[in-house]
Amino acid sequence: MADVANKNGILAHNTTFVAGAGITFDRTAKNGSAHVGKAVMQSAADTVVLVTAGLEIFGILTKVEPDGFCSVQDRGYGEVPDDGTAITYTNINNGLVGGATAGTVKSATAVPAAGAIRRARAIKAGTTGIVIADIG
């Protein structure tokens, strides 16, 4: 049986957004920013910022361009940093939310409102500090 760790990037879909406050271009960084690989949330129409504590994850930042735009993985499996809190699988419907540090994730502590589902859920804790998530 295949290891779920190999799912990174499977079914990935990326969409272009405006890079909001705190997401900066750096030509020396891989894919244009030190923030690439971190979790993001929508802050306004067509704009994303690093996700903050307890808020809903929209996707994973995959690239930042010098013109102020960025690419976000908004569906599929991907790796995202955790905030150091142990990821729990007791109720997968709880999913993942923003962690203690901007751009990181943690397990949600409560089930979302009736009829709602989280956009991201933990599939497996990867290497130290990384969670394999199913986005979308």
Image (cartoon, rainbow, N blue to C red):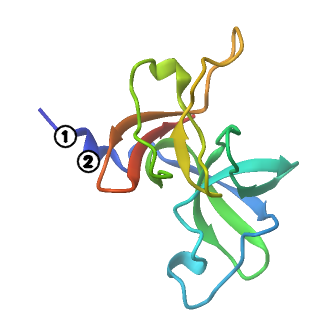
- How many C-alpha atoms fall within 10 Å of the one at disc 2: few (<14), some, or many (≥20)? few
On the rendered image, what quadrant is the N terminus found in? top left
Q: Are marks 2 and 1 in contact (CB under 8 Å)?
A: yes
Q: Which residue is the site of mark 1?
A: 3
Residue at image coords 65%, 58%:
102
Q: From this viewpoint, is residue 13 visible?
A: yes
* Mark 2 lies on residue: 6
Residue 9 seen in the figure: no
Secondary structure of the residue carrying tag 2 is helix
Q: Position of residue 64 (x, y in %)?
A: 65, 72
- Identify the residue shown where x is 66% and y is 43%: 58
Front residue of this view, candidates 5 and 97: 97
Residue type beneath disc 1: Asp
Determine the residue located farthest toward the bottom in the rendered image: 28
Measuring from the top left, give residue 53's x and y in whole percent.
68, 46
10 Å neighbourhood of mark 1: few (<14), some, or many (≥20)?
Answer: few
Residue lying furthest left in this view? 1
Image height check: is 102 above or below 69? above
Query: In the picture provided, is 109 more to the left or to the right than 58?
Result: left
Kind of residue at disc 2: Asn
Q: Position of residue 27 (x, y in %)?
A: 61, 89
Rendered residue at 44%/41% (across/down): 133
Q: What is the quadrant of the C terminus in the image? A: top right
Nearest to the observer: residue 34 or residue 8 = 34
What kind of element bears circle 1? loop
Which is more toward the observer, 57 or 67?
57
Q: Is residue 11 left or right of residue 135?
A: left
Indicate the position of residue 71 as horizontal and vertical percent values: 64, 62
Which residue is at the far right?
45
Q: Measured along the vertical axis of the image, is residue 110 above or below residue 13? A: above
As drawn, the label of residue 93 is: none
